Amino acid sequence: MVTEAGIVGKIGFNTNGVGTCLNAIRAKPMISSKVPIHVALRLCLESTSVDNAVKTLESLGGVASAQHILCADSTKALGLELSPVGDKHIPEDASGIIEHTNHFLENHYVNEPPWLSGSPIRLQRLGELTQELIQGGVQGEAITPALLRERIFSDTYNKPQAICCEEDPSRHISNRSSSLFNIVMNLDSKNLGAEVVFGRVGSGEEGPVLTMPW
């Protein structure tokens, strides 16, 4: 996973069925002597389980900057609200779901000024959409990547800062955000893989569905 750009870890999964996703957080302080977040992601992706990943990160004294890593394996998922001055872990709710956007929910150790006004709205919308699926009886094998793309990840409520995010023309071009890709992982060791779509799903401009392993 090492590239010329120096990225050692990001979003993905390993052969042990440990997967990671990342939510960027803007907060202070940053302590450069601690573990860079991309190295933390790589350490998670070299782990054999969620618990093993957490133990490794804790043994190294924490990360350099505030970020949220969603770490999961075939039996457990955990939202890791990491920071240089203390961590908080968010377990699955009663439905087995962890919902997170671009602000901390439990980690109050850091100084986190308002950043993306749409983040709390996206979190609330995410809860509404997942509850619609649950109340509609969608469960088990009916929860497919295609269904999640159609019912959740293509949602444009409160655009441009929607779940399916598009560039906001009112912001300076150097400070605009857009959904670049979507990934849905299956971490079951018997059916390990993922579906990836580049671009904003549901926009009509996204690419084809790609399957991993490639």
Image (spheres, rainbow, N blue to C red):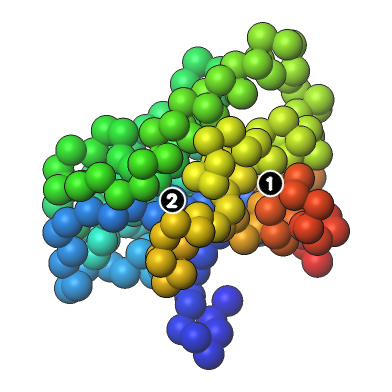
Q: Is residue 128 visible?
A: yes
Q: Earlier in the sequence, mark 1 or mark 2?
A: 2
Provide residue 80's location: percent of width, then percent of height: 37, 44
Tell me whether circle 1 and circle 2 mark residues in contact (CB < 8 Å): no
Q: The residue under label 2 is which amino acid type? A: Asn
Q: Nearer the viewer, residue 41 or 169?
A: 169
x 19%, y 72%: residue: 32
Q: Is residue 89 above or below residue 25?
A: above
Could you give the CA–CA distance between mark 1 and mark 2, rounded to whole angstroms?
Answer: 15 Å
* Of the two numbered discs 1 and 2 in the rendering, the one whose residue sits closer to the viewer: 2
Callout 1: helix, strand or loop?
strand
Residue sitting at 81 percent across and 25 percent down? 142
Quarter of the rendering containing residue 57: bottom left
**Vertical placement of 85 versus 149: above or below?**
below
Please state the horizontal and vertical placement of residue 143, each as a whole percent of the image: 75, 29
Mark 2 residue crowding within 10 angstroms, few (<14) / some (14–19) / many (20+): some
Label placed on residue 23: 2
Q: Residue at x 28, y 55 (%)?
A: 26
Q: Position of residue 39 (x, y in %)?
A: 39, 69
Please tell me which residue lies in front, 128 or 196. Answer: 128
Relative placement, left or right, of 143 versus 162 is: right
| Mark 1 lies on residue | 184
Give 146 or 189, whichever is nearer the viewer. 146
User: Can you see residue 78?
Assistant: no
Query: What SS does tag 2 mark?
Result: strand
Residue 139 is labelled as: none
Say which residue appears at 51% left-offset and 64% top-offset.
10
Assess disc 1: are there few (<14), some (14-19) or many (≥20) residues with their C-alpha within 10 Å of its C-alpha.
Answer: some
Percent across and percent down for residue 89 are: 33, 37
Name the amino acid, label 1: Val
Q: Quadrant of residue 63?
A: bottom left
Q: Residue furthest right?
A: 208
